[in-house]
């Protein structure tokens, strides 16, 4: 069975400080991993996916298969980064293709 | 087409009543997913459709739940004989043909009294 774990429910940092949101997963196949973000009163939206290896809004995430982790990082947090962040794993094949398994989420608060 | 839409946005019902939610995916997205999110948890998969075919149902989807996607366009999720434990946010998402990104709707918040 696939599982995604986000160990921190709450994370508080000050503006300009580095931030790291942790995500660990368990999956028997080759994982596809994503970070989704939900800003206040907005819908869930994709932040970034591991396969594209891109940086969005200053955030990056590296897939570490040895540690089964996909931590989200930003060197200098901004107040507008305050939101709920979900790590998610996508089934890669078979009839379950596309189904996302989410972690419990981490609420990030960036203080001025 | 401004994205995935869901109706209603909020629903309050009494225990034992039936409720039906609607999801309109982004045009030409052939895959449509339903998730449920309870307080303090991430979304949990319920079921999904490829065109009009329902290809998978989670064990979370008891026999009181039924979903349809007639003609492969909009989808409905019906809950019969609602229970207080059904109170949650019900999310719909559709997937691009290139399978790159799943777009979510705003959700329907159900409260069962």
Image: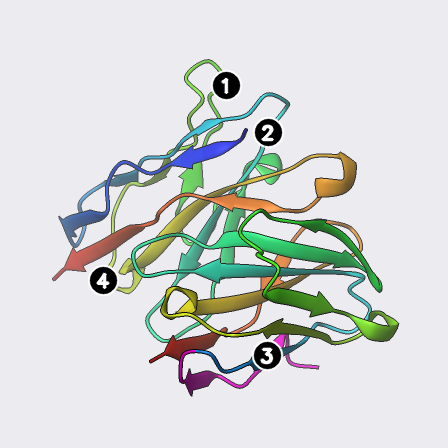
| Residue occupied by mark 1 | A65
**Helix, strand, or loop for circle 3?**
strand
Q: Chain of mark 4?
A: A
For mark 3, name the chain: B
| Residue drawn at (29%, 56%) of the image | B40
Disc on the earlier residue, 2 or 1:
2
* Labels 3 and 1 touching (C-beta < 8 A): no
Numbered label attached to residue A79 = 4
Residue A109 occupies quadrant: bottom left
Towards the viewer: B61 or A43: B61
Viewer-side label of 4, 1: 1
Locate residue A88, reporting x and y percent. 49, 43
Label annotation for residue B21: 3
**Numbered marks: total:** 4
| Image-based side of A28 in relation to A20, left or right | right
Residue A93 lies, in percent from the top left, at: 74, 34
């Amino acid at each position: 069975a696939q599982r995604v774990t986000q160990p921190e429910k709450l994370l508080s940092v000050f503006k300009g400080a580095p931030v790291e949101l942790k995500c660990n997963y368990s999956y028997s196949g080759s994982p596809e991993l994503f970070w989704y973000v939900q800003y206040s009163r907005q819908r869930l939206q994709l932040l970034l996916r591991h396969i594209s290896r891109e940086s969005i809004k200053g955030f990056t995430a590296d897939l570490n298969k040895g540690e089964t982790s996909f931590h989200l990082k930003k060197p200098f947090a901004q107040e507008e980064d305050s939101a709920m962040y979900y790590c998610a794993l996508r089934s890669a094949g078979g009839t379950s293709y596309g189904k996302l398994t989410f972690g419990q989420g981490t609420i990030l608060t960036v203080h001025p | 087409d401004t994205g995935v839409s869901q109706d209603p946005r909020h629903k309050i019902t009494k225990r034992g009543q039936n409720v039906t939610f609607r999801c309109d995916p982004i045009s030409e997205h052939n895959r449509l997913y339903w998730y449920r999110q309870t307080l303090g948890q991430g979304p949990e998969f319920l079921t999904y459709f490829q065109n009009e075919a329902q290809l998978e149902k989670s064990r979370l989807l008891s026999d009181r739940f039924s979903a349809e996607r007639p003609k492969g366009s909009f989808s409905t999720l019906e809950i019969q004989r609602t229970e207080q434990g059904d109170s949650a946010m019900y999310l719909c998402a559709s997937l691009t043909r290139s399978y790159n990104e799943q777009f979510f709707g705003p959700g329907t918040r159900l409260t069962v009294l």
